[in-house]
Structure formats: structure tokens, C-alpha cells
């Protein structure tokens, strides 16, 4: 029989779907959190009366704006810009900016919602936000990317600030884009502040911010593996994606003794049965970050590897899978193949890469499975450390940043164990992360009244 909290969540989700029609990714993200909160709401019914879930699921502010720019041929182009400022109970809004053709309001809202819980888990004072545009950076010249970034920031600058909202990178937004965005912000405001993170080292960036999401993912995975007496050493690892998160996840997993046999992009995946090494990693960094090439070129360079056009890596046998590309990149069938082939740990580097059906397969198989909001929080956590360094106008050493990153990832893992361990001892990391993240946000909202 359904409890009153389960009935409440069913009603809440029905209202959410009716109120936000057509926003499939947003519904998916909210549903996952809301259903895992049922036992907590059962014990704390006042949160239902206080409409905390309804309040968190209604972003505090959404800004949608026109981004006009001119391409290299002089043709005028129009894109759509977004910033979803979801929740500021714990601190200034914080979260990345995504430039990808698929960006729409649903994707922005799901990411801002997830970010609110993720930022809470970091224990740092950051609210949740996300932004971006349907601008497709693929094939654009540096000059076109710069003009686009300048136009995007001309509007965004009215809504952000070091104590208001601090954007950073995400898909399609890396060091180059943050540079152009920062330059335009500084020019418009005539102030040099830490309003963006992921900045260059010479102008306020933090050591290890580029590495932080991938490294943090591996630190978190190490903690998960340790609960089963395992480590990366000797394990076969699948990585998807070949961007920022994927590159540093692959590098760290390899350095911790794993054999990393795959990477991918939106066109296909490569399988290298010999595994990555330092030389191959250098090739990937140069290929992706300097030449901005495609992962298929890896198989041209290393004949022992095979390129599979149009495929994702999930049917390759592995021990550990680190999805680091995008949302819903592991479907139920993929998850079934992973488990059938012996995969016993899936740690998400991307945001929401597993569909709900895939997540159910992992839970039913009782494998180690962590949601992105816990295991990829190292990126935003190190953004938080960049904000601290900017505030005191100091640079920390790489050792100091790494020590803090390791501590934060370990604390997030502890929080997942505390709130996610079930009666039979199985750790449900999704439940643990959602409850732990929610408690802090809900408490702060209660303290601050109905605002
Ligand atoms: P990048 O743009 O650096 O890399 C993205 C990678 O994923 C590319 O290889 C890209 O291939 C691939 N990809 C993107 N969209 C798709 C798609 N629809 N289907 C298949 N492959 C796709 O982004 P990041 O590495 O920064 O981000 C990857 C994931 O990690 C995202 O989910 C992001 O939200 C998340 N994340 C990022 C953080 C960060 O600090 N950067 C922090 C926490 C999470 P292609 O080149 O073909 O587009
Ligand atoms: O999804 C994420 O956590 C990010 N893209 C990083 C956000 C940030 O502010 O560093």
C-alpha cells in the first residue's frame, strides 16, 4: 500500500508534468529525486506542508534571450541563450554553460535542478544554476566563437556577478570560450572579478580546475570500489566521450592502474584492447583540444584500435564504466549488456547519462552505481575553490587543490553511504545523494522563509 509520502510525490509529479509540458529531461531529473525522497518525507512531513519540493522545482528565475552574431561570411545568425537560476538558498547561483545544438529549456532546467543538489553535496556555499545556447561550436572558426561569446555575454552580464551568479564551462564551453566570455564581461563591467570559473591560470584560474571533474570522478569511484575490497588496479574500464571530463577521467583511471579501452564522440567510438598509455593520452589531448579533431583519428594513428562509426562503447566487456559524454547515453539495453558482460561499477561523469530504465537495471543487479550529481561534483567543487582563491586574491598549489578535491569527494561518498545504505547493506547511491543534497537545501530554505 502506498504511504502518504508516496501519494504526495505521485501528485507532485503529475502537477509538475502538467505545469511543464514537453520538458522530458526536466521531468526525468525531478522524478528521480522526488521518488528517492519518499522515505525522508515520511519521517519529516512538515516539508510536505512547507511545499519545499514544489518550491525547488520552480526555478527562482529563468532568463531567455536572443543572441545575434555575424559569421565569417558576413551572414547574420540568431541563437537562443538561457540562464536558469534554480536555487540560491546555499549561496550565489553556480553552474556551467553549455553550447550544443540540442540545448533547450528542458535540458537547461534539468541541469540547473541537478546542479542545486550537486552543489549542496560539495558542502561549499553555492546555489544551483545552468545556462547555455543552441549554438553549435562544431566547425566554427575561433573568430566566430569569439563573436558569439561576446554577444551571449552582452546579455548574460546583466544577470551575473561574483556574489550573484558565477557561470563556468560544460559541453562545448572550455578554456577558449571562458576566455572570450570573461574578456567581454570585464569590458562591459569595467571590473576584474571572479564572476566566471575555469579561467586561465594567468588571470585568476585555479590549478587543477580542468582536471577536476575527471579526477574527482576517479577519486569517488575509488571509494566505491573500496566498499567491495577493489581498486582500479588491473580493471578494464570503458570511458564514453572524449571531451574535458572523459579525457581526465581516462588519464586518472589509467594512472591508477586501470586498462582504459574506449573513448567516443557523437559520431562513434574507438576500442583499443591494449588500453591507453601516456603517449596515447598525449595524442588525444592534442587531437581534441588543439586540433579539435574527431576520435576516429585515434584508430588511424593506432592500428591496434578499431573505430565503430555510430556506436557507443557499452557492448565492450568491462569491469567499470565511466559515462562522460551526455544525458541518456546509456539506455536499458546498454545497461543490460554492461551487466551481462560483467560490469560491476558504473560511475557517472556526465549529468544523467543513464535513463531511468538503465538505472533500474543497475540497481536490480546490485552493482555499484553512482549518479552524476555525486560522482561528477569535483568539477563544481573545484570551481568553488577557484572562487575562494579569487576572493582572497591568492593562488593555491596543485597539491593543496588536489587535497581539497580528494577530501570533498570522500565526504560526498560518506554522505551517500549515510543516507543510501539499505537494510540488506546495499548502497543506493542515488537515494543517498538525493537525500543528502536535499536536506541542506531544504533546511536553508526553511530558515530563510517563504521567498
Ligand atoms: P565536452 O564538450 O568537453 O565533451 C563532450 C563530449 O561528449 C564530446 O566527446 C562530445 O562529442 C560528446 N557528446 C556531446 N554530446 C553528445 C551526444 N549528444 N551524443 C554523443 N556524444 C556526445 O564536455 P564535458 O566533457 O565538459 O562534459 C561532458 C559531460 O560531463 C556533460 O554531461 C556535462 O554536463 C558533464 N559535466 C561537465 C563538467 C565540467 O566541469 N566540464 C562538470 C560535471 C559534469 P562531440 O565532440 O561529437 O560533440
Ligand atoms: O555540471 C557541472 O557541474 C559543471 N558543468 C561544472 C559547473 C561549475 O560551475 O564548475
Image (cartoon, helix red, strand yellow):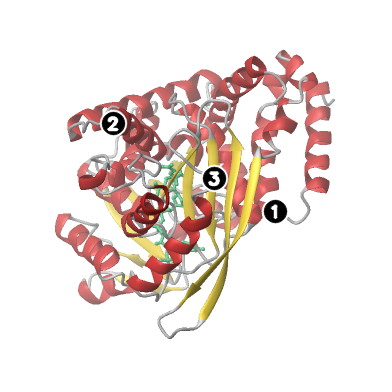
Residue 4, image x and y in percent?
Answer: 83, 22
Which dot marks residue 94? none
- Residue 230 picture quarter: top left
Q: Which residue is mark 1?
A: 24
Percent coordinates x, y for residue 213 in the rendering: 36, 43
Looking at marks 2 and 1 on the same chain, the residue that comes earlier in the sequence is marked by 1
Q: Quadrant of residue 229?
A: top left
**Where's residue 182, x and y in %?**
36, 51
Residue 450 left/right relative to 303: right
Residues under numbered marks 3 and 2 in contact, where contact means CB atoms less than 8 Å apart: no
Q: Secondary structure at mark 3?
A: loop
Residue depicted at 61% across the width and 39% down the height: 86
Q: Looking at the rendering, in which quadrant would you find the C terminus?
A: top right
Q: How far across and down, in percent of the image, does residue 280 sit?
A: 19, 61
* First-in-chain label (3 vs 2): 3
Residue at the image position 56 percent from the left and 35 percent from the top: 116
In the image, residue 139 sits, relative to residue 95, either above or below, namely: below
* Visible residue check, residue 329: no
Labels 1, 3: front one: 3
Q: Badge 3 local density, few (<14 within 10 Å), some, or many (20+)? A: few
**C-alpha separation, residue under disc 3 versus residue under disc 2:** 23 Å
Residue assigned mark 3: 159
Q: Which residue is mark 2?
A: 389
Q: Earlier in the sequence, mark 1 or mark 3?
A: 1
Q: Seen from this angle, which residue lies furthest bottom?
A: 73
Asked which secondary structure carries label 1, the reply is helix
Amino acid at each position: 500500500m502506498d504511504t502518504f509520502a508516496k501519494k504526495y510525490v505521485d501528485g507532485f509529479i503529475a502537477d509538475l508534468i502538467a505545469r511543464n509540458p514537453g520538458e522530458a529531461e526536466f521531468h526525468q531529473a525531478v522524478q528521480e529525486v522526488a521518488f528517492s525522497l519518499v522515505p525522508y518525507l515520511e519521517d519529516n512531513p512538515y516539508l510536505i506542508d512547507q511545499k519545499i519540493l514544489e518550491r525547488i522545482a520552480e526555478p527562482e528565475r529563468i532568463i531567455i534571450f536572443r543572441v545575434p552574431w555575424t559569421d565569417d561570411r558576413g551572414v547574420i545568425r540568431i541563437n537562443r541563450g538561457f540562464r536558469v537560476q534554480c536555487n540560491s538558498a546555499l549561496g550565489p547561483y553556480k553552474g556551467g554553460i553549455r553550447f550544443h545544438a540540442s540545448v533547450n529549456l528542458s535540458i537547461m532546467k534539468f541541469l540547473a535542478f541537478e546542479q542545486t543538489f550537486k552543489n549542496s553535496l560539495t558542502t561549499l556555499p553555492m546555489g544551483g544554476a545552468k545556462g547555455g545556447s543552441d549554438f553549435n561550436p562544431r566547425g566554427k572558426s575561433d573568430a566566430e566563437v569569439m563573436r558569439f561569446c561576446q554577444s551571449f555575454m552582452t546579455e548574460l552580464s546583466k544577470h551575473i556577478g561574483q556574489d550573484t551568479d558565477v557561470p563556468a564551462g560544460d559541453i562545448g564551453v572550455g578554456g577558449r570560450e571562458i576566455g572570450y566570455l570573461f574578456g567581454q564581461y570585464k569590458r562591459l563591467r569595467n571590473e576584474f572579478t571572479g564572476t566566471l570559473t575555469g579561467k586561465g591560470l594567468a588571470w585568476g584560474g585555479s590549478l587543477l580546475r580542468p582536471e577536476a571533474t575527471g579526477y574527482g570522478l576517479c577519486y569517488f569511484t575509488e571509494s566505491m570500489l573500496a566498499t567491495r575490497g577493489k581498486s582500479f588496479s588491473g580493471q578494464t574500464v570503458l570511458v564514453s566521450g572524449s571531451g574535458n571530463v572523459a579525457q581526465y577521467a581516462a588519464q586518472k583511471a589509467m594512472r591508477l592502474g586501470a586498462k582504459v579501452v574506449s573513448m567516443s564522440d557523437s559520431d562513434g567510438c574507438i576500442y583499443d584492447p591494449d588500453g591507453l598509455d601516456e603517449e596515447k593520452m598525449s595524442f588525444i589531448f592534442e587531437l581534441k583540444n588543439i586540433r579539435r579533431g574527431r576520435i576516429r583519428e585515434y584508430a588511424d594513428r593506432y592500428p591496434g584500435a578499431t573505430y565503430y562509426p555510430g556506436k557507443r562503447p557499452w557492448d565492450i566487456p568491462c569491469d567499470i564504466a565511466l559515462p562522460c559524454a551526455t544525458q541518456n547515453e546509456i539506455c536499458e539495453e546498454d545497461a543490460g549488456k554492461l551487466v551481462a558482460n560483467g560490469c560491476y561499477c558504473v560511475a557517472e561523469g556526465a549529468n544523467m547519462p543513464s535513463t531511468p530504465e538503465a538505472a533500474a537495471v543497475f540497481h536490480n543487479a546490485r552493482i555499484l552505481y553512482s549518479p552524476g550529481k555525486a560522482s561528477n561534483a569535483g568539477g563544481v567543487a573545484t570551481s568553488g575553490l577557484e572562487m575562494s582563491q579569487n576572493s582572497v586574491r591568492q593562488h593555491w598549489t596543485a597539491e593543496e587543490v588536489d587535497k581539497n578535491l580528494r577530501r570533498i569527494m570522500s565526504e560526498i561518498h560518506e554522505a551517500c553511504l549515510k543516507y543510501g545504505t539499505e537494510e540488506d547493506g546495499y548502497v543506493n547511491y542515488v537515494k543517498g545523494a538525493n537525500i543528502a543534497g536535499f536536506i541542506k537545501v531544504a533546511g536553508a530554505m526553511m530558515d530563510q522563509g517563504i521567498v
